[in-house]
Structure formats: structure tokens, C-alpha cells
Image: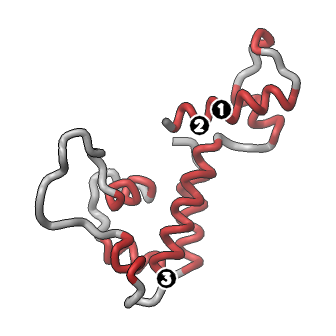
Amino acid sequence: MENKINVFATSWYRVMLNIKHLDLVSNARIYKTTNTQPLINRVRQRQLRFIGHALRLPTEEPFRIYALYVPTHGRRRPGRQKTSYLAYIQNLLGDAEGDLSPEAITAMATDRRMWRGRVIGRCATDR
């Protein structure tokens, strides 16, 4: 899905710049010309900014309670996604092993400057 998002964005950059597909211009050159980055980086940044906002809500707010909720019982039905939302956020924050607990993520999000720096740092590089 991430590749499809980037392909869509670069194809429209090509249309805006009037670059034909046969011109063989690399995506890196298109990003440099348009002063942009892959669109998926912007999507990730917005997702992390939103979860940071949600985790700074008052503790009794239902959305904050269930923002990083992981059920302790049951199994996923066949065909369901393999990754939980918590695992997805951990991966976006650079924790592929899942060492960051929901409490640690919440603690990081409460400090807005640190959270913003982490979000910008994680999303600025193309992974």
C-alpha cells in the first residue's frame, strides 16, 4: 500500500512538471525538483502527530484509554490484520522489536517538544 501511495504522488508530480514517462527521470530528481519527499513520509508524520495529540488528552477521556489498547484475551479471526495498532505505532517510532510499552509511548507523547522532534526525525528519512 505504501508503494501505491508513493507511485500515485510521483505520477502526479510528473504530470504537473510535464515530464513524460519515456523521459526516464528518476523519482529522486522529481522530489528534488518539487522540493518534496515521498508522500508516505507525510502520512506517517500525520499519524504520529495524531496519536501524540490523543495521548495528551485527559486520562479519563475514552479515546486516550483505548488509543493503544491491546486485548489480553481471545484470538484474531482468520483474515484479520496481523499487526495491532500498538505494534504499528511502535514500528513507526523505530521500535521493531516491540520494546516500547504503551506507558512509555504515552510518557514520550506528554513532552510535546520531544515528541515533535522524534516524529520529525522518524519521518524525515525514507525507510
Label 1 vs label 3, nearer the camera: 1
The residue at which mark 1 appears reads as: 8
Q: Are marks 3 and 2 in contact (CB under 8 Å)?
A: no
Mark 1 falls on what kind of element? Answer: helix
Q: Are marks 1 and 2 in contact (CB under 8 Å)?
A: yes
State whether residue 21 is above or below residue 10.
above
**Which residue is more in the foreground, 44 or 99?**
44
The residue at which mark 3 appears reads as: 56
Specify the amino acid type for callout 1.
Answer: Phe
Residue 11's x, y, as percent? Answer: 72, 27
Q: Residue furthest right?
A: 18
Residue 26's x, y, as percent? Answer: 71, 22
Q: Residue furthest top?
A: 22
- Crowding at dot 3, Cα within 10 Å, few <14 / some 14-19 / many 20+, comes out as some
User: In terms of image quadrants, where is residue 82?
Assistant: top left
- Image-based side of 34 in relation to 7, left or right: right
Specify the amino acid type for callout 2.
Answer: Ile
The residue at which mark 2 appears reads as: 5
Q: Earlier in the sequence, mark 3 or mark 2?
A: 2
Q: Residue at 58% across / 57% down in the picture?
A: 45
Q: Residue at 58% across / 44% down in the picture?
A: 40
